[in-house]
Image (spheres, grey):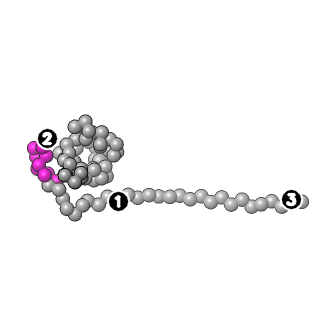
Amino acid sequence: MRRQRKKTVITMEVLQRTVVRPDSAKFNALCPVCLSESVFLTPNEVIAGWVLSARDLFRLIESGEIHFLETPTGQLFVCPNSLEGFEKR
């Protein structure tokens, strides 16, 4: 007589949460395109606050549809005025 082996099935569910906190140091600047002074946003703040993926955001920046500034150290900041018309989360 054969002995039956028990089969154990383990199911795991993984949840992931991403938290984006605004930097404590705000970046105020004059946008060279719309000529208005405002608090510029980091790409992560834009992605978290608007219905845009990172790929869409950078595509819009490259095409000039969204205004941006780049610091001498290579940091990118987005003009919030140019985000009008894009859906917020």
Q: Position of residue 14 (x, y in %)?
A: 50, 58
Which residue is drawn at the image coordinates 19% and 51% (left, top)?
A: 71
- In this view, the residue in front, 16 or 26, is 26
Q: Is residue 8 visible?
A: yes
- Measure the alpha-carbon separation of dots 2 and 3: 80 Å
Which residue is drawn at the image coordinates 17% and 45% (left, top)?
A: 81
Q: Magenta span has 85?
A: no
- Mark 3 Cα-neighbour bin, 10 Å: few <14, some 14–19, many ≥20: few
- Measure the alpha-carbon separation of dots 1 and 3: 55 Å
Residue 26 found in image quarter: bottom left
Residue at far front of view? 72
Counting residues from the start of the chain, the first of labels 2 and 3 encountered is 3
Counting residues from the start of the chain, the first of labels 1 and 3 encountered is 3
Q: Mark 2: which secondary structure?
A: loop
Residue at far right of view? 1
Which residue is drawn at the image coordinates 32% and 41% (left, top)?
A: 56
State which region is magenta. 29-39
Label 1 belongs to which residue?
Answer: 19
Q: Nearer the viewer, mark 2 or mark 3?
A: 2
Left-right relation of 46 to 32: right
Label 2–label 3 contact, CB within 8 A: no
- Mark 2 Cα-neighbour bin, 10 Å: few <14, some 14–19, many ≥20: few
Q: Position of residue 4 (x, y in %)?
A: 80, 59
- Mark 1 Cα-neighbour bin, 10 Å: few <14, some 14–19, many ≥20: few
Q: Mark 1: which secondary structure?
A: loop
Label 3 belongs to which residue?
Answer: 2
Q: Amino acid at mark 3?
A: Arg
**Quadrant, the N terminus:** bottom right
Q: Amino acid at mark 1?
A: Val
Label 2 belongs to which residue?
Answer: 33
